[in-house]
Image: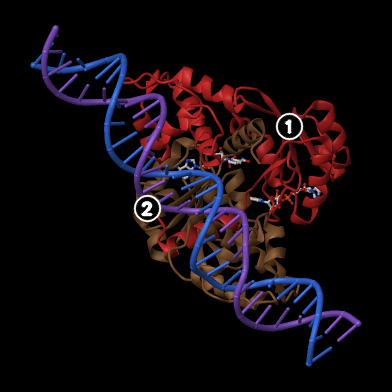
Chain colours: A brown, B red, C purple, D blue
DNA sequence: CAATTATAGTGAATTATTTCACAATAAGTC
DNA sequence: GACTTATTGTGAAATAATTCACTATAATTG
């Protein structure tokens, strides 16, 4: 039944989408809620419930047609559109990301890189256009870039975020250790921090939280 | 009141810990639940409730003493111990991580690197010992390594996970696009995948989920 | 020092999410 | 074709998490 979708459901459906995308490549045609659950580590009830928020799409007694389910989730969650992305901070990590096409499936396309260091911009070898950091706002707006990956040192994060938001960015993946909490309702942020992940894992196994 | 701690609470407390760690460096002495909440993007009620799962530690009317609160969270969640970690896959990303000391605060220490490519092991320049991948199980056990970062291509993940678990690893941060779902109750996994993050952010702003 | 303001802690109420149980239907088997 | 098995979708029940409202206490102000 279509209605408000719980956030945890949205997160799981994104994983289901990634799984279907993968399976499709291997020529699979159909799959059951049980099998999906096993693959992404949740119970089959949850999978069925999650999918049911988008309306009926499976075949009772027979499972889900992969192509159809993927299209269904994709259109409801907006995962079927090609979206433009950029990388800010072209150091070790930023460069590795820019040059690793495989990271982005065919839904996301990196169309710009930014760095404050002019030397880097001039010496970098890539087909993707690179710009000085002060042009972020302008280029984001001009090229209608929706997503950004931040790979600058912590002290530079705040300024970068300001420019990205001024340009109208919609989503940010932040790899710097300085966490961003979005003040702007239209911008969504995901902070990724290895020490933070290590802490969480340590806490989980300290508390033995299943 | 001490009791079972909800998982979302555990996650937030880890963030609070990181924040306190940061503030302590700048010489701050005390902080209110309101200020903590603002910094990590949640309401002050939640912060107080979260902290209260660990017992009383604040001063009514006055806030929390940073050093004391940090020690308190740290000891309850096991964040105060130095834990050993390793990196598996010494390519672009793995190397960058190994060489970026700053990523790990002083709670985590990388004590080993692994790769299946013998040439890489011989040519790599680092103070951290590096080993061929078939020794993973042995070294993990010998050095009592609790945490691992996986930065190998997707096709190699399954085998690596098997070896890590055989050695007794407790937590894994997986950067490869092939997601791991832990079958073993004692092992906790965090999958980090840029396309996945982009998908989730896209879904959030498509649905306008605050 | 009296009044005011800031703040932690927490049981209770509310809201959100997950799990369950089962009807309905498709596919497979003999 | 009758019987068995596999499977979805979903309302209802159960659990989990968040938010609220309020008490108590510390700090600050005039
Ligand atoms: N190296 C890793 O493996 C790794 C892993 C996870 C997270 N991180 C984090 O990612 C960030 C980058 O790490 P790195 O190892 O690539 O560092 P790096 O020093 O190699 O690269 C940082 C880049 O950011 C650029 N920069 C600095 N200030 C800028 C600004 N104001 N605007 C635009 N560009 C700016 C620098 O010129 C440089 O090119 C750091 O915050 C780091 O903690 C790194
Ligand atoms: N490059 C990035 O910016 C980036 C960002 C996020 C995630 N990732 C992911 O991280 C992984 C590594 O990316 P990369 O760019 O560093 O690739 P890379 O090819 O530079 O490095 C991969 C390394 O893994 C080693 N390896 C291969 N099989 C192995 C095995 N069985 N045991 C041990 N080591 C093995 C290789 O020898 C190589 O050194 C990939 O899965 C990639 O998708 C990369």
Q: Residue at x 81, y 32 (%)?
A: B140
Q: Nearer the viewer, residue B207 or B5?
A: B5
Q: What secondary structure is marked by label 2? A: helix
Disc 2 packing (10 Å; few <14; some 14–19; many ≥20): many
- Checking the image for residue B146, the label placed there is 1
Q: Considering only vertical position in the picture, is D1 above or below B164?
A: below
Q: Residue at x 62, y 53 (%)?
A: B193
Q: Report how far apart the C-alphas of labels 2 and 1 lie in the structure.
A: 39 Å
| Residue B100 position within the rendered picture, expressed as x and y whole percent measured from the top left | 63, 34
Q: Which residue is mark 2?
A: A165
Would you say residue A129 is visible in this rendering?
A: no
Disc 1 packing (10 Å; few <14; some 14–19; many ≥20): many
| Residue B129 position within the rendered picture, expressed as x and y whole percent measured from the top left | 79, 30
| Residue A76 position within the rendered picture, expressed as x and y whole percent measured from the top left | 49, 71
Q: In this rendering, which labeled residue sits more in front, label 2 or label 1?
A: 1
Respond whether the residues carrying marks 2 and 1 are from the same subunit: no
| Residue A161 position within the rendered picture, expressed as x and y whole percent measured from the top left | 41, 47
The quarter of the image holding the C terminus of chain A is top right
Q: Considering only vertical position in the picture, is B6 above or below D1?
A: above
Q: Residue at x 46, y 50 (%)?
A: A189
The answer to whether the residue bearing label 2 lies less than 8 angstroms from the nearest atom of ligand 1 is no
Q: Nearer the viewer, residue B27 or A69?
A: A69
Q: Residue at x 69, y 76 (%)?
A: A61
Q: Nearer the viewer, residue A76 or B28?
A: A76
Q: Quadrant of residue B124?
A: top right
Q: Tell me the subunit letter for badge 2.
A: A
Q: Quadrant of residue D24?
A: top left
């Amino acid at each position: 039944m279509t209605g408000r979708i719980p956030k945890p459901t949205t997160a799981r459906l994104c994983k289901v989408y990634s799984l279907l995308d993968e399976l499709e490549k291997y020529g699979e045609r159909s799959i059951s809620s049980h099998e999906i659950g096993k693959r992404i580590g949740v119970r089959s009830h949850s999978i069925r419930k999650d999918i049911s928020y988008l309306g009926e799409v499976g075949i009772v007694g027979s499972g889900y047609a992969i192509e159809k389910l993927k299209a269904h989730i994709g259109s409801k969650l907006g995962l079927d559109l090609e979206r433009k992305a950029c990388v800010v901070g072209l150091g070790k990590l930023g460069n590795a990301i820019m040059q690793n096409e495989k990271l982005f499936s065919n839904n996301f396309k990196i169309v710009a890189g930014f760095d404050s260091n002019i030397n880097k911009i001039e010496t970098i070898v890539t087909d993707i256009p690179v710009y000085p950091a002060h042009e972020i706002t302008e280029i984001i707006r001009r090229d209608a870039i929706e997503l950004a990956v931040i790979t600058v040192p912590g002290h530079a994060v705040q300024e970068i975020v300001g420019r990205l938001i001024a340009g109208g960015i919609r989503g940010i993946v932040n790899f710097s250790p300085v966490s961003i909490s979005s003040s702007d309702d239209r911008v969504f942020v995901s902070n990724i921090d290895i020490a933070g992940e290590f802490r969480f894992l340590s806490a989980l196994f300290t508390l033995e939280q299943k």
